[in-house]
Image (cartoon, helix red, strand yellow):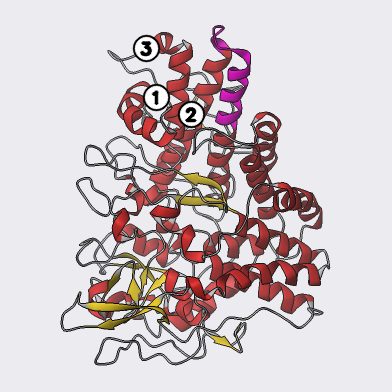
Amino acid sequence: MKKINLIITALLGFMGLITGCSDEFLTREPEGQFGQPSLLTPDGVEGILYGAYAMIDGAGLDGTADWNVTVENWAFNLASDDALKGTDAGDQPEQSFIEAYDFQAFNGHITNRWRSLYKGIARTNDAIVSAKAVEEIDEARRAQIIAEATFLRAVFHMEARKMWRMPPYIGDDVFDINDVNSTLVPNDREIWPLIEADFEAAVAVLPVSQSQVGRPTKWAAKAFLAKAKVYQGFNTDGSANIAKLQEAKPILEDILNNGPFSLVDNFEDNFLVSTRNNSESIFEIQYAVSSAADQASSRGMGLAHPYTDPWGCCGFYQVSQNLVNAYQTEGGLPLLDAFDATDVSSDTNDDGSSVVTTTLDPRLDHTVGRPGILYKGFKIYQTDFVRDLSYAGPFFSKKHVAEPEGFGIGGWGNLTANNYRYMRLDMIILWLAEVEVELGNLEAARGLVNQIRTRAANPAGFVPNAVQGESRNDFTVEEGVPAANYNIATYDSPWTDPIEARKAVRFETRLEFAMEGHRFWDLVRWGIAAETLNAYIASESNHRTYLSGRSFTANKNEYFPIPSQAIDRSFKEGTATLTQDPAY
């Protein structure tokens, strides 16, 4: 049986015809193409479900560049202290506004993210409604289709709830593919309970394992349910929502103690094509690419590659000095308070090696491209990484870039089969550590954090040194010789101060998941976005002068405005059903 990512590749065009999204962000039956009645067969319903899966990576907006709405969320993580827009000042000004916290309801990236998510929601509802309508489907298979579609619907709504303070929830109870007004529902209620209910319904039906990678399991549904609860675990003032954290704890413990998952030995194995779907993976976005087709590749990350051969485009998604500085260590431990007091230099010696002598967390060089350090099988000089060194600096993102053996073999080498690890065991571990801190179990939290740091300290996973030869790509890799002065240790003294324990867990979360599209929403859910990001701007603007004068506005910039286009097209009986966020 073919794997689901390959099936999606074959069906993308077909599903674009049968479940295309109209300008009203709804699904219509196109004229002169496959009609809805012809799809009400067992095979037709399977095709509709595949169409819902095809939206999970954010791609699929008809006639629209979909890289800015990718599931990796990198265009919106520019609002965090990890990332810079990169490239040059004039390229994609929509992103410059996001980076500067000037969120506008007409920003095309924000509009496209809305369209992408609600197109995915429409497809999931179509799959559920159609599965219920076709009598010929085996009952067990019907339940599976509905459970998978319900899981996907919850994922799409969760992403919407992260982006917007009050997005609408659209269920199959109101969805009618033949009525364009059926989904014009008001955004007048909190949708977290509905998201949780969808995940709970999926948990009740999904199997513990699937024969096809890319389909969710019971464990994946549990993990996302726990994530929904953890994301509600703090109030807007930063205080803990103990009730939600207590609900999350047994789910997280169940996954950790009873699930079939284990941390991989090397941190880097979570970011290589060759080690996809490994023992740590709970749910991955499956990408595929061949010489014949690249539509199912990692298209959303195509522009976020170094601006030099062998990539050649486009220099987006660079790394802040602030993030690089966070990987400095003292006695093997992070500098929780003073990490940004001293900059990690980007200078190199005459032989191309880094001049940095301070001790560093080894995860830095799996996360960030630094001058003088091996980068996915290449050693690149400072000016090779970026399009405009004076604009966004010398550091580049790395995790999503494929190793040379995994380069795309379609029309563009940037389009690879490097999966996005949407849900991993290390996330479960650090969420549980968060919960334990807030419940007063500081030593349990320390043990969980030390599991993550012990894996990071495995010397077999260190980036090796590369000795430069006479030309740019002439170098010799010294296996077993670290590329930098790596020093990482576990927390060996008991944790007795909840403030320091909380700080350590959150810092570890940043180090482990940097540049994976989570940081902005972590700051928001912890209730510390304004204080953290305004401190970041004050520091980073010393390096990136274009950030001078910018600021994050508390109680506003935690969420994005609902697109004006969506509001304009939500009118029903002369009244808009969508209401703009009062902060905008």
Give the quadrant of the N terminus: top left
Residue at image coords 51%, 18%: 176
Query: Which residue carries the number 3 mark?
Result: 35
**Tally of numbered discs:** 3
Give the image quarter of residue 436: bottom right
Amino acid type, label 3: Gly
Vertical position of residue 22 compared to residue 440: above or below: above
Sequence-wise, the earlier of marks 1 and 2 is 1
- Residue 147 lies in the magenta stretch: yes
Q: Which mark is residue 19?
A: 1
Between residues 326 and 111, which one lies in front from this camera angle? 326
Residue 234 seen: no
Query: Which residue carries the number 2 mark?
Result: 122
Residue at image coords 55%, 64%: 265
What span is in magenta? 133-150
Sequence-wise, the earlier of marks 3 and 1 is 1
Under circle 3, the secondary element is: loop
Tell me: 77 left or right of 201: left
Amino acid type, label 1: Thr
